[in-house]
Image (spheres, rainbow, N blue to C red):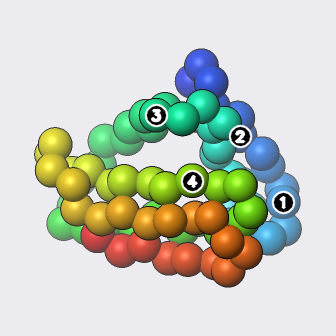
Amino acid sequence: MSARGWLRRCNLGTGDYNNDLTTSDTSGDVWTSSFTGSSVSVIAPKEAGAGRIEVQIDGQTRATADLSDRKSTRLNS
């Protein structure tokens, strides 16, 4: 995955999917991905200074999560 403003960190060993994490430090940035299926899972770390994420499917908000503390979260939609 490569997109302006996004950074992919690899081989973290922290339990993220495939040990990779894609991040942006820009408020309001949007990341999109096409998929075929009936559900999606977002697996993301919580950490100090992190923000909120919103998951939209077909233009409708399906879930939100606040990633601003140090616990892990798994968001299913």
Q: Give 40 or 74, whichever is nearer the viewer.
A: 74
Q: Please say if the residues under marks 4 and 1 sit with CB atoms less than 8 Å apart.
A: no
Q: Is residue 54 left or right of residue 59?
A: right
* Percent position of residue 73, x then y: 55, 77
Nearest to the eye among marks 4 and 2: give it: 4
Q: CA distance from mark 4 to mark 1?
A: 20 Å
Q: Give 21 or 48, whichever is nearer the viewer.
A: 48
Query: Mark 1 or mark 3, which has the lower sequence index?
Result: 1
Label 2: which secondary element = strand
What's the residue type where badge 2 is placed? Answer: Arg
What's the residue type where badge 1 is placed? Answer: Leu
In the displayed structure, would residue 59 be above or below residue 11?
Answer: above
Write down the residue under mark 1.
12
Q: CA distance from mark 3 to mark 2?
A: 18 Å
Q: Give 57 or 1, whichever is nearer the viewer.
A: 57
In the displayed structure, would residue 26 be above or below residue 35?
Answer: above
Q: Please say if the residues under marks 1 and 3 sit with CB atoms less than 8 Å apart.
A: no
Nearest to the eye among marks 4 and 1: give it: 4
Write down the residue under mark 4.
51
Nearest to the eye among marks 3 and 2: give it: 3
Write down the residue under mark 2.
8
Q: Work out which quarter of the rendered image holds the N terminus and state it.
A: top right
Q: CA distance from mark 1 to mark 2?
A: 11 Å
What's the residue type where badge 4 is placed? Answer: Gly
Q: Which mark is residue 28?
A: 3
Q: Give 51 or 1, whichever is nearer the viewer.
A: 51
Residue visible at 50% across and 76% down in the picture = 74
Residue 2 can be seen, yes or no: no
Residue visible at 73% across and 75% down in the picture = 70
